[in-house]
Image (spheres, grey):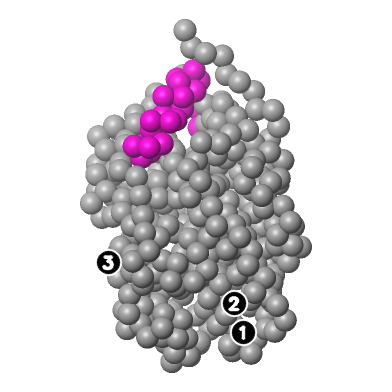
């Protein structure tokens, strides 16, 4: 017998206003129960391939398959290894071939059930197979709920750097079931929190102040957590709606990422440094570098450092397990950043908490000297 579907207690819907590519982010406890009905309403008759990883499959695949089956949707699972290492050429090939083998056609769908790695990989495979399949994001980590499942950046990593191969491909729906976070490992939750704090740091000083007071409640769950997720998704949706392809201020969402991606690549995309941890450290460095450039005064740097450290995130290069590469290698990785134009470095810098801006033509010598000092070499 098929279990009756539970109704979500409350849900918040954040629209992503992208014209013909518009979609909803549905946030709330047990919203995953509505997945089958929503897919049926959006794409009647569609079959789905569910891409997930081994850990998420153990926890959620049976439930999601049952939810889809209850709506009469045929689902084929594709399971990959967990971790950033899965955003590889090899896995991309495996996943594309599995989608094709499952005869997922243009009217069908790919469902990304997992964290940021799964969302990026599934989205890129969906963008590529049969020159474009629709896909649905079902994020199961905090980071994916507040960031990577929204906005259509999909891709895999290159030996030259993070996310260097990919496509903009928007999902048709995001279902962020916050109940799923109850069983998320604590380190993963903390890493996702870095992206939540990022929204305050880049453009919403009041939200950052709120987080300084309420972060423990966000960690504990309940209304504060749902509020933080909804504020983050609204912030991202607004930026993506006005600059879908990052020709302008979408780059603000990259605060902390230029440094962060170089450290992640340096750690071999391993468990030594999770993406969100790299972003936390990158945000602190962006504030410190901005201060060095005379862009901000007051206590912003110490506030940011203190808050992220208190929330359990790395804020110093020495916090990275196994250290970071030498400055030459870091500069090589930074030079491959997607924001580089005609060899000129672009960084997201700040004039204060909530006041980020896109700085084009940042002096590489200043970045080099700053990194050398920070890593003590
Ligand atoms: O959505 C965006 O735009 C972002 O930059 C959000 C980032 O937090 C996210 O990690 C993104 O995947 C990084 O994109 P990239 O273009 O720097 O690879």
Q: Residue drawn at (45%, 46%), measured in percent from left and top?
A: 115
First reached walking from the N terminus: tag 1 or tag 3 = 3
In reply to whether residue 334 is colored magenta, the answer given is: no
In the rendered image, which residue does mark 1 sit on?
291
Q: Are marks 1 and 2 in contact (CB under 8 Å)?
A: yes
Q: Quadrant of residue 309?
A: bottom right
Tell me the crowding category of disc 3: few under 14, some 14 to 19, or many 20 or more residues within 10 angstroms, Cα based.
few
Q: Residue drawn at (41%, 83%), measured in percent from left and top?
A: 376
Residue at the extreme top: 1
Q: Can you give x and y, in whole percent of width and height, for residue 243 in the image?
A: 59, 65
Q: Is residue 224 left or right of residue 331?
A: right
In the rendered image, which residue does mark 2 sit on?
287
Tell me the crowding category of disc 1: few under 14, some 14 to 19, or many 20 or more residues within 10 angstroms, Cα based.
some
Q: Residue drawn at (24%, 44%), measured in percent from left and top?
A: 94
Q: Residue drawn at (56%, 14%), measured in percent from left and top?
A: 4
In the rendered image, which residue does mark 3 sit on?
159
- Main SS of the magenta part reads helix
Residue 261 is at least partly visible in this image: no
Q: Are marks 3 and 2 in contact (CB under 8 Å)?
A: no
Q: Can you give x and y, in whole percent of width and height, for residue 101 in the image?
A: 25, 34
Residue 190 is at least partly visible in this image: yes
Q: What SS does tag 1 mark?
A: helix
Q: Is residue 32 left or right of residue 318?
A: right
């Amino acid at each position: 017998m098929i279990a009756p579907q539970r109704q979500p207690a409350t849900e918040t819907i954040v629209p992503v206003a992208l014209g013909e590519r518009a979609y909803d982010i549905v946030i709330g406890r047990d919203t995953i129960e509505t997945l089958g009905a929503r897919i049926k309403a959006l794409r009647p008759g569609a079959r789905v391939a569910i891409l997930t990883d081994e850990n998420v499959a153990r926890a959620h695949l049976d439930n999601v398959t049952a939810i889809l089956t209850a709506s009469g949707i045929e689902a084929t699972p594709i399971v990959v290894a967990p971790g950033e290492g899965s955003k590889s050429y090899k896995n991309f090939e495996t996943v594309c071939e599995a989608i094709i083998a499952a005869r997922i056609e243009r009217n069908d769908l790919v469902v990304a059930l997992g964290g940021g790695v799964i969302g990026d990989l599934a989205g890129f495979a969906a963008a590529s197979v049969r020159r474009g399949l629709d896909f649905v994001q079902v994020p199961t980590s905090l980071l994916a709920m507040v960031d990577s499942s929204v906005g259509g950046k999909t891709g895999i990593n290159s030996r030259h750097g993070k996310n260097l191969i990919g496509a903009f491909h928007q999902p048709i729906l995001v279902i962020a079931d916050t109940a799923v976070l109850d069983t998320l490992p604590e380190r993963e939750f903390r890493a996702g929190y870095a992206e939540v704090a990022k929204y305050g740091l880049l453009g919403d000083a009041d939200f950052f102040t709120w987080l300084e007071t309420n972060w423990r409640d966000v960690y504990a769950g309940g209304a504060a957590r749902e509020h933080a997720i909804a504020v983050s998704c609204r912030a991202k949706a607004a930026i993506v709606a006005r600059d879908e392809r990052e020709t302008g201020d979408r780059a603000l969402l990259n605060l902390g990422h230029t440094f962060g991606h170089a450290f992640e690549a340096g750690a071999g995309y391993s468990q030594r440094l999770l993406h969100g941890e790299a972003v936390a450290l990158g945000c602190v460095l962006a504030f410190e570098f901005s201060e060095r450039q005379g862009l901000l005064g007051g206590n912003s740097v110490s506030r940011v450092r203190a808050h992220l450290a208190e929330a359990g995130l790395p804020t110093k290069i020495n916090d990275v397990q196994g250290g970071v590469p030498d400055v030459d290698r870091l500069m090589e990785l930074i030079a491959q950043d997607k924001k580089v134009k005609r060899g000129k470095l672009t960084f997201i810098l700040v004039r204060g908490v909530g006041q980020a801006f896109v700085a084009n033509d940042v002096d590489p010598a200043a970045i080099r000297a700053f990194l050398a000092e920070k890593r003590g070499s």
